[in-house]
Amino acid sequence: MRTCLMEISSQTLDIYCANNPDGRLLHPSECSMFYSCTQQNNSQVNPNLPARAVECKYPYLVDAGTVTCKPHTLVKCGGRREPYSPCDYVSNRCTSKACTKCELIMPSCYGKADNYYPAINQEMTAHYIICKDQRVMGAGSCPNGTIFDIRTLTCTDVVYPLSLLEFCTNYHTGRVQNPANCAQYYDCAMSLTEVTECTYPDLYDVTSHLCLPYNQVTCAGRPVFLDPCDSFTFCPVQPCPYCNSAYPSCVGRNGAVGGFRFEPSMYYQCVNDRLVLKYCQTTFNWTAKTCNELINPGQTDQSSSTSTTTVRPSNTTLASNDLKANIVNTCKAWAGLIMYKEHNCAQFFNCSNPTSPLGAYIDECPVGYLFNIFTNNCHPYNEVMCQGRYEPEQVCDYQRYCQNKSNDGCSECKKIYPSCQNVSSGMAPAQGGFYYSAVICRSGRAVNVSTCSAGQFYDAVMKKCSPIMSDESAKVMCKELPKQIIPHPIYCNKYIVCGENIPGNPNHANYTIKECPYPLLFSNGLCRNFKTVSCGQRKTAISPCDYDELRKCPESSSTCKVGTADTCPDKTDHICAPCEKRYPSCIDKPDGFVPYPGRLFTRDFVRCDSGRTLAILKCVQSVFDPNTRSCGLKLDQVIAELKTDPISFCKRYPSALIPDSTHCARFYNCSGSSSSGIDVAHLQECRHPKLFDTNKRICDNFIEVLNTAGCEEKFQPKHYCDYVSICPSQRFKTCNDCRKALPSCINQVNGIHGNPPGQAVTAGFMYCVEGRVLATSPCPQGTSFHQSVKACVQQSNG
């Protein structure tokens, strides 16, 4: 967290710039920024930037020697913070509540090895980003219709099952193009093991994620198959030897017209090498290559009265009237036999299911599926031609959902599973109110019945499962339930108080979202003991920071905006510790008294119950013993035991952080490597100028440590060379060499001083705070620093 101590004050900058109107100063803590005297006010350019501060374009950094922006490979940041991601640059961050958060739209390579990675929000498409040195160095697209795989991190013409599973876990209704076929895609809302294909001759558009007419789609290298028998529409299961004899190819036959012996009213035209089916109101005339005229009632059309025979493959079992009339005897004779039903395209006879609730031996395909007479299996509806059989399109058209159909057309079923007619593709609600299941619609018909993932509900306004309750959805719901208290659809610790209807808007009502006090949960109209509440699909709040009220900055933080949640830790002008640092979590902790997380062998401990933090407590004159789970242990005893055998101690307490008894910046880190200690196993040191806080057990700003835990009688390092990370080292063989080379603020008052100190005129200057050098900078060329005016002054020619 940045504080004002790491900025050069505006007063100091004004003094410096008054004498150096074109001057530049290194920012003391940010490697991507410098101060420029030509930069006056940033409030209109970017309010995130401090006064007179200039920030390099990503991924450039500020070179300390020239105080100019250079490629990151040419810059050494030293003690300045080195940004890696685009969102580490304050110029890229949000400047208002209305803007989209930077992390949601700009990719990051931080923590990633040099490689190619998926582009943010464009996973499993052709797009990828290039990461080098943990920075985003560019973007690219895979060639020839291939996609960038999120697991192999390569362009591929194959959709791997594990990659598809990972993608669909994050995008429940997403779709992924099949690089091997421009008409096919994988649908996360359907089976992940089977590819879905557009109805011939439509093709899949990767931009709209829809099946569109072939002349509206750019395949960009994905193969296009023109022969109808290469499609699922005419050949659901390959190979199908009957297809070519029934549906001819139109490749190279543009303009050709022909009919079908098995369907007198159907004919085809060849357009752009594709077979296009047409239907006559009467019958197709093979000689004239057109439809016969519609005859008057009472007349006989000799050309259309010729009997025709429906052609079917020889390996398909037909359910004749005799077989159906004696289905019980038939199934006794042929156990396991499957036969299609002549009058329902979703049903079939299954001789292995004598006790079916739909009737003896009657079975039915799932919603969105129909029975294929050629394969004797259920297939997605767009892969089956019903050829006159009744074709169910809505959930309540399927008998398993509407077993007692009455004159009202299954009204009870339709209350639960509404029709998809005139509904755009997506989800439709499965019941009234806030609910967690929905009917998946496509092209006006039901293709599946789905349940939202845990922590989501079906938003009737947005028409999809959502982890966020929109304002519009809450107002619509409260219109149906005015003046009632209802559970929040997402969070188990919240509830909604519905008010009066909004004047002038008959479809909306006012509402207020309330939250139960920690750790209570909401159920049956009241905030109740968490042990008595079942949250179901709603998110169960467990830790204190799962509650919005506890996330808000406390009133005791005088420089913080009271009542603003999760803002102060992200604002440079407000100081407030994040919730996770103010309230410990008991998740995965045993019931009873346990050490404060991250503060082993301190005075702090907590009381846990079922993962909830019920109390934050302190020992009075001792530290908390993790073995007896009680107070009474002395810190001196712990340190003495640790120093006797650090390796053995750290094996027993692998997460322990124990302060050194003689040095205010050193501590024992049991989670670190025993071989990397400073002379002693596990002994480590904070980086300059931080000190180790014995209360919080972290390396913290030295001002904060001195004002709270303090250093007592321990050695307090101030100079760079007081830290072992500086000397001895390859750069400085001895600390005497170090002190001769590096500046010192010892015995200097806070502020700007010449570098080196004690001289009236120097080539540069340094910034001192409490005897520590926080920043150094050379004067611009042709100037020198004058201690008398504390500024860089133009050198005289004399």
Image: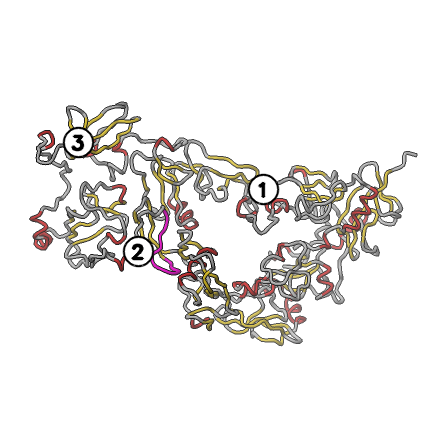
Q: Three-letter amino acid code at disc 2?
A: Tyr
x and y percent of residue 550 in the render? 57, 65
Please give the name of the residue rendered at 54% of the width and 72% of the height, measured from the top-left corner.
614
Q: Is residue 678 magenta?
A: no
x and y percent of residue 587 in the render? 50, 65
CA gap, disc 2 to disc 3?
39 Å
Query: Mark 3 highlights which residue?
Result: 260
Decide: marks 1, 3 in contact (CB < 8 A)?
A: no
Please give the name of the residue rendered at 28% of the width and 48% of the height, measured from the top-left corner.
368
x and y percent of residue 137 in the render? 57, 38
377 lies above or below 529: above
Q: Residue furthest right?
A: 798
CA gap, disc 2 to disc 1?
50 Å
x and y percent of residue 798 in the render? 93, 34
Query: Mark 2 highlights which residue?
Result: 417
Q: Main secondary structure of the magenta part?
A: loop
Question: Could you say which disc has been placed on residue 511 in the image?
Answer: none
Query: Mark 1 highlights which residue?
Result: 135
In the rendered structure, the answer to whether residue 168 lies left or right of residue 250 reads right
Query: Closer to the N terminus: mark 2 or mark 1?
Result: 1
Query: Closer to the N terminus: mark 2 or mark 3?
Result: 3
In the rendered structure, the answer to whether residue 26 lies left or right of residue 117 reads right
Q: Three-letter amino acid code at disc 3?
A: Phe
* 2 or 3: mark nearer the eye: 2
Q: Identify the secondary structure beneath mark 2.
A: loop
CA gap, disc 1 to disc 3?
62 Å
How did the renderer colour the structure?
secondary structure
Q: Which residues are magenta?
A: 425-436
Q: Identify the secondary structure beneath mark 3.
A: strand
Query: Closer to the N terminus: mark 1 or mark 3?
Result: 1
495 lies above or below 464: below
Q: Three-letter amino acid code at disc 1?
A: Arg
